Amino acid sequence: MFYLRDDVPVSIGHAVDDAMAAHLVGNVKFSVMTWTYDIIDMVEDDLVTSARNSMLFFDACPSAFGGLTAFDLKNLRFGESYIPNVLNTCKRLKRLCLYNCDSGDCITLPVEHSHLSELSIVHCSLERVMLNWIPQLTRMVFEGWLQFQDPPFIGHAPLLEAVSLTNLSLSYHKKVKLSDFLSGSSIRYLKLRFRSKKIWVQPECPTQCLASVFRLRFLNIVDLLEGYDLT
């Protein structure tokens, strides 16, 4: 874990390059932190500056990123192509975490990777997340989406078994239709967390969504207020 300040990240990246070339390490994780940690302390210029420093680090150390197995990115405003470029370069990546990241404008984020097994997207202003092709993905966390946004589209993710969805739902948020979200998936463990009184799951008759949830084995409902239900 390190901060995006001065030349420290590049020095770390070059050290990782050398260690990997000498076969001294097998798994590498980068947790890239900004100097300001709390979301409420961040301003737009901070997000842009952090993203620029992150891209300089990324461009300066391609070998280190090529061997990366876990990558945490926090408080960044990146260009539309940044995450796809990261996924394309980090061939060995198994875990990716995005926290409070956006592109300034709401964009659709396509995710395609042959080895990624864990994906966490928390408080990111993205129009849509498209899990187009992630054959090794097994676990996903998605927390805090926009009012006009649906949970991620699940394309080719045949091994995806565990999904956690959390949202602070306001009056203008769309409700999630679980039968559509789960349709065709292999999800066995589903966690739904509610951060307000508003239920963001669309009520459905059990028989209507039976075909979509027949693989589901565990449903964990968290912070649902007393007197509220999903029917």
Image (spheres, rainbow, N blue to C red):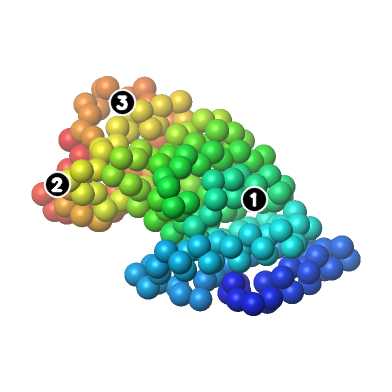
- Residue 209's label in the rendered image is 3
- Evaluate whether residue 27 shows in this view: no
Q: CA distance from mark 2 to mark 3?
A: 20 Å
Left of 165 or right of it: where is 19? right
Left of 183 or right of it: where is 118? right
Residue 148, given in percent of the width and then of the height, sits at 30, 40
Q: CA distance from mark 1 to mark 2?
A: 42 Å
- Residue 228's label in the rendered image is 2
Left of 178 or right of it: where is 49? right
Q: Is residue 94 above or below residue 150?
A: below
Q: Is residue 1 above or below residue 68?
A: below
Q: Amino acid at mark 1?
A: Val
- Residue located 37% across and 73% down the image: 41
Q: Is residue 133 above or below residue 22?
A: above
- SS of the residue under disc 3: loop
- Residue located 67% across and 63% down the image: 56
- Residue located 26% across and 22% down the image: 207
**Within 10 Å of the Cα at label 2, are there few (<14), some (14-19), or many (20+) other Cα atoms?**
few
Q: Which residue is mark 1?
A: 86
Residue 226, given in percent of the width and then of the height, sits at 13, 53
